[in-house]
Amino acid sequence: MREIGLPHPRLPLPAARQADDPATFLGWLAEAIPLVEHLGIRGMHREDDALIWNVALAPNLNDKGTGFGGALTAQTTLLGWCWTTLWLRERGYARDVVVAEASQRFLAPVTGDYRLICTPESEAGPEQLEKRLKARGKGRIALVQRLWCDDTLCLEARGDYAVLPDA
């Protein structure tokens, strides 16, 4: 178990312009954030600018037998943090990322295993973040997370993620 107040060691950066191995990153994430091993994340992959998790519903049930809003909210927030962290790591940045603002809209009950998809809110978002990092050493990006249960959009979330300057 992690000790309170002590940062977890960073995962070594991948080779220049290379993406992290998804299984290695998820393993590190479960050590860094103990809650992760209980979220039911079955897999993670990228498709263009999207980061996608496949998630089991069983560990995220509420008292009604559907998805627990608190667990789903935690997952959308964490998925945005992962998108930002992985994007930075692929560009050689080992930086701290924090969620600055987050909101969710619950649209339908989650009744089975699901997928969470995170993308930039704006197509220009990643380029703008890169420019801010080079000019000011810090930046922000707005991301959207969508939870799909089969073909039903059950949850849409939005978050602003801040990349902190080097300490």
Image (cartoon, rainbow, N blue to C red):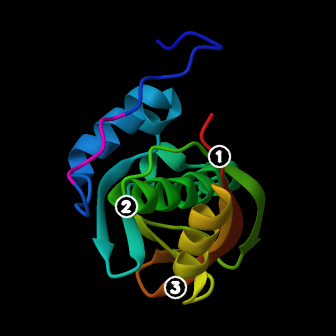
- Element at label 2: loop
Earlier-in-chain disc, 1 versus 3:
3
In front of the other: 114 or 82: 82
Residue 17 percent across, percent down from the top left: 26, 64
User: Which of the 4 quarters of the picture holds residue 107?
Assistant: bottom right
The residue wearing badge 2 is: 91
Tell me which residue sits at (37%, 61%) in the image: 91
The residue wearing badge 1 is: 165
User: Which of the 4 quarters of the picture holds residue 139?
Assistant: bottom right
The residue wearing badge 3 is: 152
Q: Does the magenta stretch include residue 1?
A: no
First to last magenta residue range: 11-15
Horizontally, is 106 left or right of 113 in the view?
right
Please tell me the numbered disc located at residue 119: none
Residue 142 percent across, percent down from the top left: 67, 73
Q: The disc labelled 3 sits on which kind of residue?
A: Thr
Tally the numbered discs. 3
Residue 75 percent across, percent down from the top left: 56, 53
Please say if 149 is above or below 152: above
Tell me which residue sits at (40%, 33%) in the image: 30
- Element at label 3: strand
Q: How far apart are marks 2 and 3 (CA)?
A: 34 Å
